[in-house]
Image (spheres, rainbow, N blue to C red):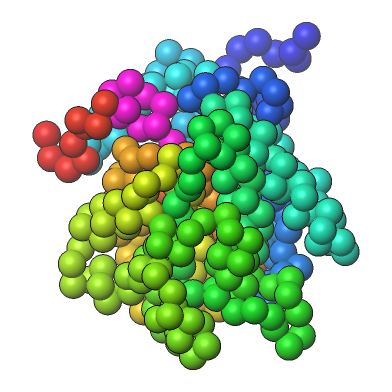
Amino acid sequence: MPIRKGPIPKTGGILTFIGAPRGSIDNLGPGMVGVLGVPFDVSATDKLGTRTGPQAYRETSTYFWNHTDPDSSLIEIDSRVRVDTELMKNMVRDLGDLSVSHVDWSVTESRLRDAARRITLQAAIPVILGGDHFITYPLVQGYADAIKERSGGNIGYIQFSGRLDLGRQDPLWGEVWRGATARRIIDTGAVGPENMVWVGVNGYVPLEDWELSRKLPVTLFTAEDVRERGIGEIASRALEIAGRGCDGVYVSVDIDVLDGGYVAMTGAPRFDGLKNVDMFAAMDVLARGPVGAIDICGLNPLVEVMGLGKTGQRFGVDMLLRFIEPKISKEGASGVTPRHGS
């Protein structure tokens, strides 16, 4: 029996993403969203601390839709779309954090792959709160496993990141390091290179990564491409390429894709990255496409505490909500909702 039945403040209650109920993978249903935290960061070569990202996102999310009045609703002002907060809470389940091993990567790798596979086989959408970006490749494998098992089809992959992550190994970290994320996806065969797209690459990248990207049939859109052609065109094109001949698309967002002037709280912030509104607009496009799984990685809340406050985790929650809400709402799923103007 609950201690109190009446309204509680946003900061009260058990901490979950947007105040959604706790749940298990087995209880997910078609079209639902399973939010899973992955507090893993020993593959980061810069500052440790991204393991605290999942809880930071949950804490910040309570200020968005966790309202004290169950009959209240919100409106997304750009699109003039009413947000049904009760529908969100009915369709979203917080699955808690994955039990990871920081000393045995093979254990963590197996658990990540299995979790993504099981969520997807429930016909639900995995939304992953990282964590360092290296967690992405086994998650992609698990999503690919489920799609193959369910329909026999393939998947595509879109990576929003300032880096290419096409390295093989680091001289200190070896093969378990975040700079090998996309290379592992290719090497394991989880996604064909022709269905892999990078958006927002900027700054300095290893020459070997660049040369490999020129040899493979992958697609790169740099931050400069976004500035010249607009994020709407780039996101639509990325979705078309990644989804060509596939039954689903996995999207990974490394928060270092953003300009450090907006979110500086990463291991190594960039200052030639995307704008915050670029990522919001990209989510508007992706939410109405065949994207069946998404992760957000690279936020370091420990740097946030010492820096500019909670801008990064607040941005991450805002971005995910722009993806999730259209996915589960009837109005958004129809694909006719305008995002700007009335």
305 relative to 87 in the view: left or right:
right
Residue 50, image quadrant? bottom right
Residue shown at 45% from the left, 86% from the top? 211
Q: Residue reaching furthest right? A: 103
Q: Nearer the viewer, residue 65 or 23?
A: 23
Q: Residue reaching furthest front? A: 152
Residue shown at 45% from the left, 84% from the top? 210
Q: Nearer the viewer, residue 270 or 224?
A: 224
Q: How many marks?
A: 0
Q: Position of residue 263 (x, y in %)?
A: 46, 66
Query: Is 217 located above or below residue 63 in the figure?
Result: below
Residue 8, image quadrant? top right
Residue shown at 33% from the left, 40% from the top? 289
Q: Position of residue 161 (x, y in %)?
A: 46, 67
157 relative to 124 in the view: left or right:
left
Q: Quadrant of the C terminus?
A: top left
The secondary structure that most of the magenta stretch takes on is: helix
Q: Quadrant of the N terminus?
A: top right
- Whether residue 330 is in magenta: the answer is yes
Q: Position of residue 296 (x, y in %)?
A: 53, 54
Residue shown at 79% from the left, 54% from the top? 108
Q: Is residue 303 visible?
A: no
Q: Residue reaching furthest bottom? A: 207
Q: Where are the magenta residues, as a range?
A: 321-333
Q: Position of residue 26 (x, y in %)?
A: 70, 23
Query: Is 260 located above or below residue 78 in the figure?
Result: below
330 relative to 162 in the view: left or right:
left
